[in-house]
Image (cartoon, grey):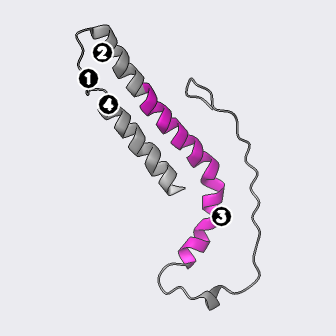
Amino acid sequence: MGRVLRFCAWKAKWWRTQQSRRTLDDPNLSDGLKAFAEQQAAQELDIADNWRAKWTAARARAQPIIEGLVDGYQEVEHVGPSETIELYIEDDEYEPNGGY
């Protein structure tokens, strides 16, 4: 989960660096390319926000487990009945205008 969020942040930053890569004689085309790069960056951040919202419940349920596995982890400390966690997340289709 964390890697996906970090990738989206990296990709948004990458798109923003693309804005100044080309200088053109036509200011309209130059402005259009900058606007496109900004739109792509915003879209990456929207995707990250969408994933973050969907994963909130799973992250909250996993946090005690993660905290229990820090330093000094031994398998025998965690022996016992296991619990199944089922998550049902409705996934609306992505809309091109940046909404979900």
Name which of mark 3 and mark 1 comes first in the sequence. Answer: 1
Mark 4 residue element = helix
Inter-mark Cα distance, 3 to 1:
47 Å
Q: Look at the image and tell me in which quarter the N terminus lies.
A: bottom right
Q: Determine which residue is flagged by label 1.
A: 22
Vertical relation: 27 (above or below) 18: above
Residue lying at the far bottom in this picture: please name it: 76
In-front residue for pair 14/97: 14
Magenta-highlighted stretch: main secondary structure? helix
Q: Determine which residue is flagged by label 2.
A: 30
**Magenta part of the protein: which range?**
39-68
Inter-mark Cα distance, 4 to 2:
11 Å
Mark 3 residue element = helix
- Residue 70: give x, y in percent of width and height: 50, 78
Inter-mark Cα distance, 3 to 4:
39 Å
Name which of mark 3 and mark 2 comes first in the sequence. Answer: 2
Name which of mark 2 and mark 1 comes first in the sequence. Answer: 1
Mark 2 residue element = helix
Q: Determine which residue is flagged by label 4.
A: 18
At a point 65% along the width and 64% down the height, the residue shown is 61
Inter-mark Cα distance, 1 to 4:
8 Å
Name which of mark 3 and mark 4 comes first in the sequence. Answer: 4
Q: Determine which residue is flagged by label 3.
A: 61
What amino acid type is highlighted by mark number 1? Arg
Q: CB atoms at circles 2 and 1 under 8 Å apart? A: yes
Residue 76 drawn in magenta: no
What amino acid type is highlighted by mark number 4? Gln
Judge depth for marks 3 and 2 and give the one in front. Answer: 2
Q: Look at the image and tell me in which quarter the C terminus lies.
A: top right
